[in-house]
Image (cartoon, helix red, strand yellow):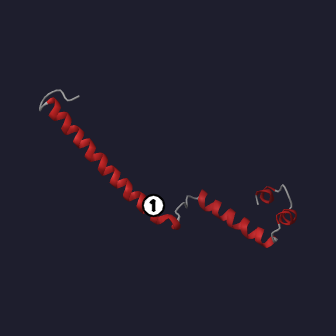
Amino acid sequence: MLEGLRGESSIAELCRKEGINQNLYYRWSEEFLEAGKKRLAGDTARQANSDEVKELRREAAHLKEALAETVLENRLLKKSTFGAGGDDT
């Protein structure tokens, strides 16, 4: 398809070589160019992966919570090791 878009080969020649109908080539090239325009315009939402995005957000929230608990536990351990009011660096 890129050969045709770049003008490196004629569409008819390219379609013969690949064994596809020219109408199919034009449909594919139109879809390809339209997808590129959407991507460049920032339309990157993919409906097919919305469940995956939700799962990743849940996982990120879980990891943030786990990190916060670990930091808190670390601070408590430092305070107990160095004593209240001591040097806790």
The residue lying toward the viewer, choosing from 33 and 67, is 67
Residue type at mark 1: give it: Val
Question: Residue 73 is drawn in which quadrant?
Answer: top left
Name the residue at 76% across, 57% down: 2
The C terminus lies in which quarter of the figure?
Answer: top left
Q: Residues within 10 Å of mark 1 (few under 14, many from 20)?
A: some
**Residue shown at 53% from the left, 64% from the top:** 46
Question: Looking at the image, is 70 positioned above or below residue 25?
Answer: above
Residue reaching furthest left?
A: 84
Q: Which residue is mark 1?
A: 53
Count how many numbered circles sit on residues in the image: 1
The percent position of residue 29, horizontal first and vertical second, equals: 73, 65
Residue furthest out toward the top: 87
| Left or right, 3 with reference to 31 | right
State the residue in front, 18 or 30.
18
The answer to whether residue 76 is left or right of residue 4 is left
Residue under the image location 15 percent in, 34 percent down: 80
Residue 85 coordinates in the image, percent (x, y): 12, 30
Q: Name the residue: 71% across, 67% down.
A: 30
Quadrant location of the N terminus? bottom right
| Secondary structure category for the residue under label 1 | helix
Q: Quadrant of residue 7?
A: bottom right
Give percent across and percent down for residue 35. Answer: 64, 63
